[in-house]
Image: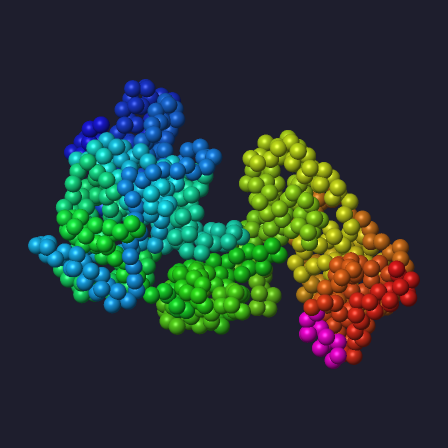
Amino acid sequence: MAAVSDSDLADNPYVEDPPTSFEDVETIEADAAREQAGKLRAAIRYHDYRYYVEADPVVGDRTYDALFSRLQDLEEAFDLATDGSPTQRVGGEPLEELGEVDHVAPMRSIDQGGEVADVREFDERVRRGLTEYDGPIQYFCEPKFDGLSVEVVYEDGEFVRAATRGDGEVGEDVTENVRTIRSVPQRLRGDYPDYLAVRGEVYMPREAFTAYNRERVENGDDPFANPRNAAAGTLRQLDPAITAQRPLAVFFFGVLDASVDFESHAGIHERLPEWGLRVCDRARVVDEIEAAIDYRDAQLDARDELDYEIDGVVLKVNDGDACDRLGSTSRAPRWAFAYKFPARKEETTVRDIVVQVGRTGRLTPVALMDPVEVGGVTVTRASLHNPSLIEDLGVGIGDRVRIKRAGDVIPDVVEVVEGNGDGHFAFPDACPACGSQVERDGPMAFCTGGLTCPAQRERSVEHYASRDGLDIEGLGEKAVEQLLEAGLVENAADLYELSVEDLADLEGWGETSARNLVDELDAAREPELDEFLTALGIPQVGGVTARNLAQAFGSFEAIREAAEGGDEPAEGQVTLGEAVGEDTRADTFEAVPDVGPVVARSIVDFFEGEGNRAVLSRLLDHVDPQDADHSQGEALDGLTFVFTGSLSDYTRGEAQDLVERAGGSATSSVSGNTDYLVVGENAGQRKRDDAEDNDVAMLSEDEFVDLLDSKGVL
């Protein structure tokens, strides 16, 4: 196929000041459509070259998008799509698995070291190996990219294959995924060779990585640990459409095989851009090893300013003939050396601060940072915990901060070393996920959107089906995510409207698994009241509080009416104190054991939320929470128990149920109102200390069982 030169684009109307509005595709003739599509493809390839290789675009993003969209419309309307078209970067059909590819030439690793003595020793080895070489010994120096190495093959100028490095001899076939990367040309430019196999490094630009991690955190997903992991995971996706959605780029830096010869590494670096292959502009040729060391030090100083991660520099003997004389070992060339940077330690730069929305609506600020080693682990994010901590630290985007790992597990920002001068991060007044008002509760902040907030929605459905909720088998995290992505479920109420046919059509599902889940959901239509309350995920309401509410009110309707300003708990179930606040609804709930002002207010707010009420109304069309069972009477009436440690014959929940069904109370903390602390195996010391301070009797598990037996509970 003939090469396309810049002169061939002279009469192309889509190169300079292109139009962005077009005649409707339904009115254009087929021949005209074919001609226009050809010009659009050529122009888009040119614009890709100017953007990715020259870093000097001649059209804006919106203009480029308009041209690209027009080409898509023409190809779809007239069936004009070709494998080499720029539109094919959006990703093809999912792959069953990544196949294996034999490399055209070994993709060897290179020797490396982090000390200046290692570099000088490398230079000495090179000189010993070139004693009969007459030319000057120069070094070609370039950054060592922290990404994923790939082989990319072109035949007659057309992109035909790409593979990961693998073991150096055989790699994974990632052709369709690499095709989606915009800085990889589908067709070479200029006077290209008939055959070319190049080596490149796929990476995720730092700014794009931060933005992508921000999106993941805001959606409740775990962020990638570093850009390299993000690039590697993206490139190995079985669905090229997923790869196309993620911001990957590539630098080319070597030739594995070609139908032309190159005299030097600098020559390769000069020729690749002529063919449309992007190279790094920080490469240099130096005349001696000391200058190469200076080059490395300069890149170390500049690394934080780059939009890509580098972990050192690569030094190569520049002359091709000298490289041939030096040769290679079985694993590495003798003419190249990687001079590594020291690991970043403890101090790093905050690139972004995102606000993550938890299942209960709590907003947690998270700092996304340049990778830094803390306690032997590389971290790229750290918790800022709450708005008050941000204010206390005075931390903002762009600040240099010190990091520590709390308890050797969770990284925290502990100090601003150098501020950027713009002040601390301004915590949002609206939820980043749904736009609902943010309310402050002491140092913490909460979204008021409830079950209608997208960030809370997925986790609320997961919680509803989890062991802490209604324990619906077959509805784990991945299944819930799949149901939400398919548009089958938006909240817990939708679960009960799923059909076998809906589920069986999903990838990875079948008739049997679909039927099993529908049966599980049917079995969860009459849950115990406390289990249903726990499953709703009311902020601050866990299993113990849910059981106390169930015992106090007896029915779900009574709880809802109390929260909405209706009836109080049934007579004899709790003794209500005199209402002293303006909102008697919260006072009503404070009369329940183990419910304080914060929890009471949270319960009222949950039932008051318009979105929550709408979801509950639909949910109750499918679910009938069972009234609390008081059949065992009042054998433990007036007695309050707290449990610590693990029991052998009961779970903690089962033991608490026994107490509550017999008229007693089970709370989570020891106070002066506690009668017994039941101490199991591996019990914590704090509750035992509290029991001693409040003169509370402590029972072993056997003594607890004896007490229940003596009261006629067992």
Q: Which of these two is toward me, 194 or 6?
A: 194
Residue 53 in percent (x, y) is at 25, 45
Q: Is residue 464 visible?
A: no
Instruction: Report the residue at 52% width, 65% height from top.
Output: 409
Find residue 624 and report its image quarter: top right
Residue 204 in percent (x, y) is at 37, 50
Instruction: Report the residue at 10% width, 55% height from top.
Output: 132
Say if 526 sits above or below 562 in the image: above
Q: Quadrant of the N terminus?
A: top left
Instruction: Report the residue at 32% width, 19% height from top.
Output: 29
Find residue 347 and report its image quarter: bottom left
Left or right of 93, for residue 359: right
Q: Which of these two is toward me, 330 or 488?
A: 330
Residue 687 shown in magenta: yes
Q: Quadrant of the C terminus?
A: bottom right
Say if 551 sits above or below 640 in the image: above
Left or right of 401, for residue 332: left
The extreme left residue here reads 134
Residue range highlighted in magenta? 683-693
Residue 490 in percent (x, y) is at 61, 43
Left or right of 57, for residue 241: right
